[in-house]
Image (cartoon, rainbow, N blue to C red):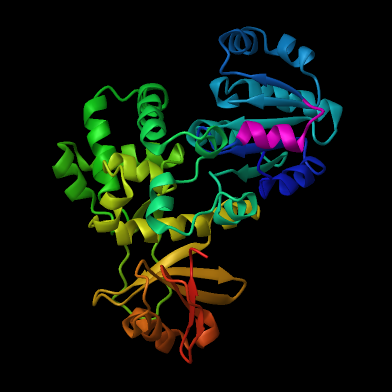
Amino acid sequence: MVQRILQEKAVNLAKKFPFVVITGPRQSGKTTLTKMAFPDYRRVSLEDMDNRAFAQEDPRGFIATYSDRTIIDEVQRVPHLLSYLQTHCDDEGKEGMYILTGSQNMELMESVDQSLSGRVGLLHLLPFSKTEMKESGFWNQNIDNMLLQGSYPRLYDKGIAPCDYYPSYINTYIERDVRRIKNITELSKFERFLKMCAARIGQLLNMSSLANDCGISVPTVEQWISVLEASYILFRLKPDFKNYSKRLVKTPKLYFYDTGLACSLLDIKTETQMNTHYLRGNLFENLVVSDFIKDEFNNGAIETALSFWRDSRGNEVDIIKRIGEEEFAYEIKSAATFNESFTKGLDYWAKLSNADSAHKTVLYGGTGEMLRSNAMIQPFMK
């Protein structure tokens, strides 16, 4: 089993709170993580119909059966159970009583906010990060291969080919999760919408364009994107609003949490296809941005502090990362050979923000590392 970075944080939070909640997409490794982090805890899954019926119909009896040191998987399936758990834990006054997992952030967080406020340590677990894959020997320096493979643990644990894994994952998600979250009945339109989102990876989100292409309304676009965000399928990267210029773009950019899933939606099946695909640069950018998100979540962040910077004249920085009062800017390029033009956006941003070269980095698809006078040049795939 791969040692997940989040494990240490989960164990530490269980020493401070009666509840630890771990959310993340389906098959991101939540069950494996909790087994490794809490080997002496009992486990019950509310995906199981008998367990779910027990919790729904007799919550007090359920809690009497699982009164302490228990992992409850997919707890969002019985949201009212959390109120009973909260009362029980308040009476007991102990830490580390329950580890709760869930794959639907919208349903789960509504229940957590209502019932467990101040009593819970919250964590997000995404598929493998670059660091985790390197430490386990799964990381591949071949860009096209890594974009296709993605980073869901089951592909590596079971040796499943992406073309076999992702279509099934997508179908299961649409049939089960989407219907349960928002009772979306136009599943064919929703599937087209999902594919249209994949075709806009790394681009500014134009809801009117999406609505027109999918034959739906703009409010429906907003609703469906919220569903995809709650299920950890995609995310919006917010623009940086620091007032260096009055002409800043205020529209978010669209990314997927996993490039393998996006490639499947784009019908990219081979490395040859990937190498010449018009979205290869966008997918590489997505790979890097999502890994930044994973690093933040693996360090215990509840919300990401990442953003991008762009003005109306097209000057842009792909990632702005804040650490304390400092800002670090990153430009992402899939090219294997460095070009001076890669630093153009960084240099323009640096003039406005008074940033020095140590705060500017180009992450590219090559192999050479350089410390230039105006920026650091680092290969992302190494």
As drawn, the residue found furthest toward the front would be 272
| Observer able to see residue 316 | yes
Vertical position of residue 295 compared to residue 198: above or below: below
Q: Residue at x 53, y 76 (%)?
A: 327
Q: Which residues are magenta?
A: 30-41
Is residue 111 or residue 124 the one in the foreground? 124
- Left or right: 225 with respect to 58? left
Of residues 202 and 229, the one nearer the viewer is 202
Q: Magenta region's main secondary structure?
A: helix
Q: Residue at x 55, y 70 (%)?
A: 322
**Which image quarter: residue 220?**
top left
Residue at image position (53%, 44%) is 127
Relative to the observer, which residue lies in front, 308 or 88?
Answer: 308
For this view, does 319 lie left or right of residue 210? right
| Residue 302 percent across, percent down from the top left | 59, 50
Residue 160, horizontal then vertical, whole percent: 47, 33
Q: Is residue 116 visible?
A: no
Q: What x and y, as percent, mark residue 234?
A: 40, 45
| Front residue (pair 338, 333) | 338
